[in-house]
Image (cartoon, rainbow, N blue to C red):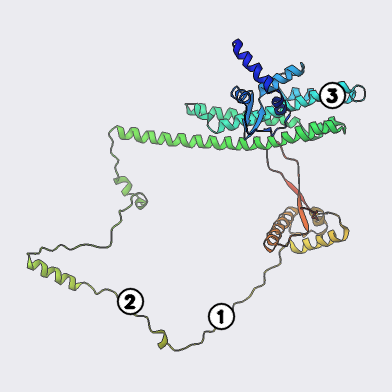
Amino acid sequence: MRAEDWATLGKHLVANAATLETIVQADEEGTAKPEMMTQGIMWLIKQHLVDEFEGSLHPSSLLIDLGVRISSQRFELSAPDLEELLVKIEQACERYLAAKDLSLADADKEQRSIWLAVRQVVTHLRDEHRATTEFIEGRYGFSPRFEDRLRDIRQAVERLERLSNKLDAFEYDKLSGWCNNDRTLRRLLLTTLHSAIMRQRTRLGDLITRLDQLGVTVRKRNRLRQVVLAVESWLQAGNVPDLEGILDRADAAEWVCASPLSLGGYLHPPVEDSQAIDDMALLIHSLPAPRVRKAVEDLAARPAARVIPTELEVVEAPIPFAQPHLEAMLLDLKEHRVPQSASRYWEDNAESEYGVNVWLYALDAYYRNLVLVAQKTEKPLRYVLEPVAEPMPRGIANQLVTDLTLRIKRRGE
């Protein structure tokens, strides 16, 4: 870089110092993009020091790393090893708890270190998600060979799987134990860090699914391209397609379509040949007479007759399986004013032929029907049926529902 480039960088950093501080200290959603973009911010976006994504401004990894290097000398680059960074967060939490009662300055310093480490992890995960999204949306097409494209897709999937495995170390119980009931640490580690990791884990699962679908699409397109090239080479070699083999097949009607024929014709008799005209007249007279639709009888001429309606057999609808059980749970809820567990209710009142999974499924379906009826009749329900799910497994966005809780609807729900 020339001296003028360094001067330009310094000028824009000084002019937008307050804006850069706001961008760096924002959460993972970023800072709202201002209506009037200054020339300095536009220059920083062009140099990839500030990222513009979905109408928000985010700090780039380079800007985070630069800020970390200036404010603290103990931290490394903004794309660190997550396991090593997790150890540093644990040590910083121990130093913060030890210094909280002794020196406020040391405690603030350690709190700043924890905050910077959390920002590094969140920014690193966001950069990985955005880079993979750009790769899916077209960057894989830069590889000319089919094997190279599949290799790029496979490497991207393996990279996301390794990142998802590293996120397993950021367990809720582990982070909660480090907080030691400190409100500041709980805000940094649980509200900010763990929530961002759970959201990114869901996004990683979606990206892995999209990459798998992309690999299937690439294979299909390659197969189509091979077939088209083979047919083109065969035709360019002077070969002529022979339809005899196709016409002899049993399913020839599916391969060869007949051209439609119009139901009509035109007669052009020779005007000067009287014999030909007489023969054509005889031919026309020998044709069968056209069919004539019978006239509809006059309605007034028809005699009046009594129409006896047919009586339809009315069959009462069966009572839904979950209705009496839900009514019993509502009676207990009304009497004790305590949320009712569907699994515990089924253990006490289980029917031998049905398991708890069938019971939960039927209860949920019946409750959803009641909600739809309440929306149509504009008579809202006074109770809510909430699912109780197990923690989300590694690398999978689906959750297993283990119970349904029936409670009274709160005000404002």
Q: Is residue 219 above or below residue 107?
A: below
| Residue located at (77% from left, 18% from top) | 72
Q: Is residue 287 above or below residue 9?
A: below
Assign the N terminus to one quadrant of the image.
Answer: top right
The residue indicated by pointer 3 is 108
Label 2 vs 1, first from the N-terminus: 2
Label 3 vs 1, first from the N-terminus: 3
Task: Please identify the quarter of the rendering in which residue 17 is found.
Answer: top right
The residue indicated by pointer 2 is 293
Query: Closest to the observer: 124 or 82?
Result: 124
Horizontal arrangement in the rendering, residue 135 relative to residue 27 (left or right)? left
Disc sitting over residue 310 in the figure: 1
> Is there a contact, CB below 8 Å, between mark 3 and mark 2?
no
Residue 364, image x and y in percent?
72, 55
Residue 286, image x and y in percent?
19, 73
Disc 3 secondary structure class: helix
What whole-number distance in Å separates the C-alpha atoms at marks 2 and 1? 32 Å
Task: Please identify the quarter of the rendering in which residue 171 is found.
Answer: top right
| Residue located at (82% from left, 33% from top) | 186
What whole-number distance in Å separates the C-alpha atoms at marks 3 and 2? 99 Å
Q: Is residue 291 above or below residue 257?
A: below
